[in-house]
């Protein structure tokens, strides 16, 4: 389920506020906001805001072959796995997963958390995020493969 709403996240003049697409990630209450897609950045970067609900867990260890990801915590507390060890990210902390680098996120606290995600080069992930909310278990691995998500051993998740 998606919706589009005006967002003035970089603008103090409401008439210039851009439209932001919000993607609901199932019934748990987590959402992804599409802040800038590859079409808006000449393919350089895609920027998303992930509002993790209190019940959100985060993805298991995985990697991407066609893009890197940078995560910036805006609020809350999130654990980040860099392929070797877990570390806790607090507001203002940044983590980067290079192309091909194993990484994961988990949220173990009951409070919500918000992350900015920058993907480079920019890749359209909107359909992937939208389909995650409704895909059945039988088609999940096919969805991940089609969108360059390659999962590895659970690494003590």
Image (cartoon, rainbow, N blue to C red):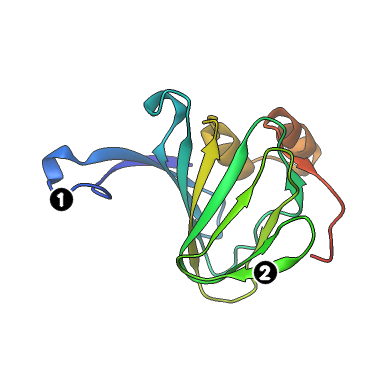
Looking at the rendered structure, which numbered label has been put on residue 12? 1
Q: How many marks?
A: 2
The residue lying toward the viewer, choosing from 119 and 109, is: 119
Q: Which residue is mark 2?
A: 87
The residue lying toward the viewer, choosing from 18 and 56, is: 18
Which residue is located at x 75 percent, y 48 percent? 102
Q: Secondary structure at mark 1?
A: loop
Counting residues from the start of the chain, the first of labels 2 and 1 encountered is 1
Q: Residue furthest bottom?
A: 110
Q: Position of residue 43 (x, y in %)?
A: 47, 25
Q: Is residue 156 above or below residue 126?
A: below
Q: Secondary structure at mark 2?
A: strand
Q: Is residue 62 left or right of residue 44?
A: right
| Real-space CA distance between mark 2 and mark 1, rounded to the nearest whole angstrom | 36 Å
Q: Is residue 99 above or below residue 40?
A: below
Q: Residues within 10 Å of mark 1 (few under 14, many from 20)?
A: few
Which residue is located at x 51 percent, y 64 percent? 93
Looking at the rendered structure, which numbered label has been put on residue 75? none
Q: Position of residue 110 (x, y in %)?
A: 57, 76
The residue lying toward the viewer, choosing from 84 and 6, is: 84
Which residue is located at x 59 percent, y 44 percent? 69
Q: Residues within 10 Å of mark 2 (few under 14, many from 20)?
A: few
């Amino acid at each position: 389920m998606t919706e589009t709403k005006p967002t003035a996240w970089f603008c103090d003049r409401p008439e210039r506020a851009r439209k932001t697409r919000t993607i609901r990630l199932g019934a748990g209450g987590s959402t992804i906001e599409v802040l800038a897609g590859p079409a808006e950045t000449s393919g350089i970067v895609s920027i998303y805001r992930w509002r993790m609900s209190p019940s959100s867990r985060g993805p298991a260890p995985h990697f991407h072959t066609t893009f890197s990801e940078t995560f910036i915590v805006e609020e809350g507390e999130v654990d980040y796995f860099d392929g070797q060890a877990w570390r806790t990210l607090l507001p203002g902390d940044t983590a980067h997963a290079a192309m091909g680098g194993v990484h994961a996120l988990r949220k173990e606290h009951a409070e919500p958390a918000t992350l900015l995600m920058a993907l480079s080069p920019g890749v359209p992930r909107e359909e992937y995020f939208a389909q995650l909310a409704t895909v059945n278990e039988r088609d999940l691995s096919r969805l991940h493969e089609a969108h360059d998500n390659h999962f590895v051993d659970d690494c003590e998740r």
